[in-house]
């Protein structure tokens, strides 16, 4: 009975201990069912005793404890060992989230021969693990910063200030290797810094945490001197010494001072007035040129209020502009960096006023807040007078053009800005309809590209026809032909086009009728030529075919040479009848199948003169008679009938001479078969420049050899 009471008291004592321990404890029987658990277990894992005791540990909390590593501990490791310490398990619990735990297990033999029990202690090390991870990350980041910092960093031990660590930047900056740096003091590596007693420095560092030395000269291993800033930072067991190379900064500061001196020298001697205002619009600086502009000494201006400087209207404009810019910054939530330009009237010391152009912008602090105004003032009085004179001149000019009898339209960027009464009368539109619109709205679609293209070229300063015609659609839909003469002018201070327009509709109608008459006459003339060709063909088919083929080749050569279309058309007409004189030659001579006698050939040679006599009185826009007369002349005067030479022969006859020879040689004749194109080309090649015009000959050779020309069938 006493033993039983003792066992009971022991169990109560053990249970009290279990419930007192802060770490969660759980007691399992041999079947791994929960016998009991500590209060801290229930609180930590948010479970209740009635849900826990008697349950298989793996089934606790809807199988949340079914953890593979826990099974390994309880089923594989613990049976072989009576104890096991610091077994790390990580698991994500539904109730308390992811946890990292250290498990300590003991097999305990119970009294009175009972089965052994397992005591499982659970230590939550989640936060400790997180802190360890953060510490590792922090150390890694610091090491990375130490290794990659652009400043030289060395660590000093606190007793004598000897270097214990050095980063790559310090090696590069000072020229010493890490091995050479470690064990030395700052003074030993060229840092010309007198810190006095190092222990005193350490005591001061303990109080402030950081000591900064400006403009410390350092002599590198190579003997070069550099300017540095040095920072000592307390690192508990060591002192961190950061060495920053400020040589470039010192040079930049020196350059800035020199630049500022030059700027002040420039500002003090510039013709324009340079000024600086604070945000209350009081002068803090004004250049000496203000005396020329306003008659005041700079010292007098510095004492003046802006109300004393500007006329009332200019003051109102300046205040409104400043207000608008400030309000715009508030709306946009960003600084307005572009400058503003105003035309302001200022008072002079002698009581007169001067017109100025003031360009200003804000001076800003490091937070981009406006702290002042920087500006330049330029005297534009003469320009204002010129503008006034120009406006007066424009008004007078407007009066003149308004009443001019010639139609005048002024455009800016093709938009109508002015029309006079004559222009309104010509097209029928009112001024209210014309002036808001683009001039292109009234141009006939077929002429629009031409007019716009000429306008663009004129604006660019390129050459355009001084006078040209185009069509305008009138108010009632009628087409009005206009002849335009335009020039670039200044209109209200901006470039504009001054257009003088003449109504040439009637002239165009007359020209159209003349052209139709001309076309009719040309058709009639062509018909006459065709009759002549037919007459020749009836008498001598060989001659007729030769003329047509020679005419086609002559036109092709003229086109290859770039001759105008009018000359090409004349060549076609003349070529079709260039042998018309042969009508007077007996047919038996023309078709004789054997070589002609000298007398017969002399008769043949007369056909050029006879053809000329037949055509010389025929009115024609082309020199038909001369082409027929000269087509057997040669450049070296070896031709007939007049032995003309070089430029004495008109160009059309020179072309006809080449085409006549080529066709004659290539084609069949009664007295011989055709010699072929190759023989004809050889003849032209051989005698170009002597018999034949070189330019004409080269054009003919290109046609056949390069461009595939073929004689008509």
Image (cartoon, rainbow, N blue to C red):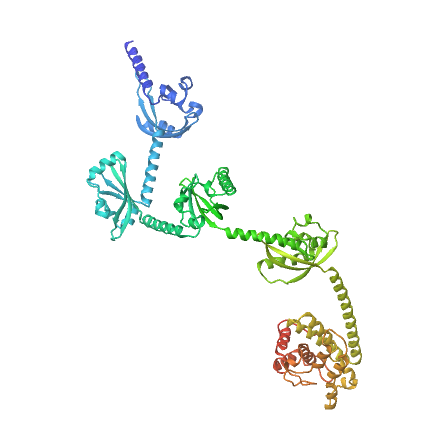
User: Looking at the picture, does residue 460 appear above or below residue 84?
Assistant: below
Q: Quadrant of the C terminus?
A: bottom right
Residue 712 seen in this snapshot: no
Q: Which of the 4 image quarters holds residue 458? A: bottom right
Q: Is residue 409 above or below residue 195?
A: below
Measured from the top left, where is residue 686 in percent x and y? 61, 82
- Residue 633 coordinates in the image, percent (x, y): 67, 83
Indicate left or right for 472 with 232 as reference: right
Q: How many marks?
A: 0
Most extreme residue toward the top, as rendered? 1
The quadrant in which the N terminus is found is top left
Residue shown at the point (25%, 36%) measured from the top left: 205
Across and down, in percent, residue 659 comes to: 68, 77
- Give the vertical position of 534 relative to 250 (above or below): below
Query: As rendered, which of 40 and 310 lies closer to the eye?
Result: 310
Q: Is residue 481 among what the camera can see?
A: yes
Residue 325 appears left or right of 255? right
The x, y position of residue 108, in whole percent, is 31, 21
Q: Quick one: 465 or 214, which is closer to the camera?
A: 465
Relative placement, left or right, of 254 versus 561 is left
Q: Is residue 279 left or right of residue 207?
A: right
| In the foreground, 610 or 482 | 482
Q: Residue at x 31, y 12 (%)?
A: 8
> Where on the picture, by quarter, is residue 600?
bottom right
């Amino acid at each position: 009975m006493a033993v039983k009471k003792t066992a009971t008291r022991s169990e109560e004592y053990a249970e009290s201990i279990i419930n007192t321990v802060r770490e969660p404890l759980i007691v399992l029987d041999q079947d791994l069912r929960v016998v009991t658990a500590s209060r801290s277990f229930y609180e930590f894992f948010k479970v209740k005793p009635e849900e826990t005791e008697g349950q298989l540990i793996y089934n606790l909390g809807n199988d949340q404890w079914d953890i593979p590593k826990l099974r390994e501990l309880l089923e594989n490791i613990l049976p072989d060992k009576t104890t096991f310490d610091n077994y790390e398990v990580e698991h994500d619990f539904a109730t308390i989230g992811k946890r990292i735990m250290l498990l300590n297990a003991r097999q305990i033999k119970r009294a009175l021969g009972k089965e052994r029990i397992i005591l499982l202690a659970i230590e939550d090390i989640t936060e400790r693990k997180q802190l360890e991870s953060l510490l590792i990350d922090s150390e890694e980041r610091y090491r990375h910063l130490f290794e990659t910092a652009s400043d030289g960093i060395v660590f000093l031990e606190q007793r004598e200030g000897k270097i214990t660590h050095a980063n790559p930047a310090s090696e590069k900056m000072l020229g010493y290797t890490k091995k050479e740096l470690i064990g030395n003091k700052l003074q030993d590596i060229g840092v010309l810094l007198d810190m006095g007693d190092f222990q005193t420095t350490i005591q001061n560092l303990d109080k402030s945490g950081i000591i900064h030395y400006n403009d410390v000269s350092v002599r590198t291993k190579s003997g070069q001197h550099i300017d540095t800033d040095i920072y000592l930072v307390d690192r508990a067991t060591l002192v961190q010494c950061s060495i920053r190379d400020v040589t470039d900064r010192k040079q930049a500061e020196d350059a800035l001072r020199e630049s500022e001196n030059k700027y002040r020298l420039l500002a003090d001697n510039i013709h324009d007035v340079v000024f600086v205002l604070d945000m209350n619009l009081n002068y803090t600086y004004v250049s000496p040129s203000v005396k020329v502009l306003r008659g005041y000494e700079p010292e007098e201006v510095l004492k003046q209020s802006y109300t004393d400087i500007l006329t009332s209207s200019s003051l109102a404009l300046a205040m409104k502009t400043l207000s608008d810019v400030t309000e715009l910054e508030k709306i946009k939530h960003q600084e307005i960096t572009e400058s503003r330009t105003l035309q302001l009237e200022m008072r002079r010391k002698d009581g007169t006023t001067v017109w100025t152009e003031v360009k200003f912008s804000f001076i800003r602090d490091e937070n981009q807040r406006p702290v002042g105004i920087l500006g330049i003032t330029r005297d534009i009085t003469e320009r204002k007078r010129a503008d006034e004179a120009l406006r007066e001149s424009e008004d007078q000019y407007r009066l003149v053009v308004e009443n001019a009898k010639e139609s005048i339209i002024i455009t800016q960027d093709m938009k109508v800005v002015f029309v006079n009464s004559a222009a309104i009368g010509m097209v029928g539109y009112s001024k209210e309809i014309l002036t808001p619109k683009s001039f292109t709205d009234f141009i006939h679609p077929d002429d629009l590209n031409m007019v716009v293209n000429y306008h663009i070229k004129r604006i660019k300063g390129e050459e355009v026809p001084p006078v040209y015609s185009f069509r305008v659609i009138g108010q009632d839909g009628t087409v009005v032909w206009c002849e335009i003469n335009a020039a670039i002018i200044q209109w209200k201070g901006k470039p504009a086009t001054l257009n003088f327009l003449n109504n040439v509709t009637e002239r165009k109608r007359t020209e159209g009728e003349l052209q139709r008459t001309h076309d009719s006459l040309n058709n009639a003339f062509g018909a006459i030529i065709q009759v002549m060709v037919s007459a020749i063909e009836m008498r001598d088919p060989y001659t007729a075919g030769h003329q047509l083929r020679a005419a086609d080749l002559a036109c092709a050569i003229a086109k290859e040479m770039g001759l105008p279309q009018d000359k090409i058309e004349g060549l076609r007409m003349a070529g079709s009848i260039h042998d018309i004189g042969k009508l007077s030659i007996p047919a038996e001579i023309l078709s004789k199948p054997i070589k002609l006698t000298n007398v017969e050939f002399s008769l043949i040679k007369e056909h050029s003169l006879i053809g000329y006599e037949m055509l010389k009185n025929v009115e024609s826009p082309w020199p038909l008679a001369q082409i027929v007369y000269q087509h057997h002349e040669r450049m070296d005067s070896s031709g007939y009938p007049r032995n003309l030479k070089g430029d004495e022969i008109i160009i059309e006859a020179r072309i006809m001479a080449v085409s006549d020879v080529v066709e004659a040689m290539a084609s069949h004749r009664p007295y011989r078969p055709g010699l072929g194109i190759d023989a004809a080309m050889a003849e032209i090649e051989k005698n170009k420049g002597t018999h034949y015009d070189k330019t004409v000959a080269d054009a003919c050779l290109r046609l056949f050899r390069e461009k595939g020309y073929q004689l008509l069938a």
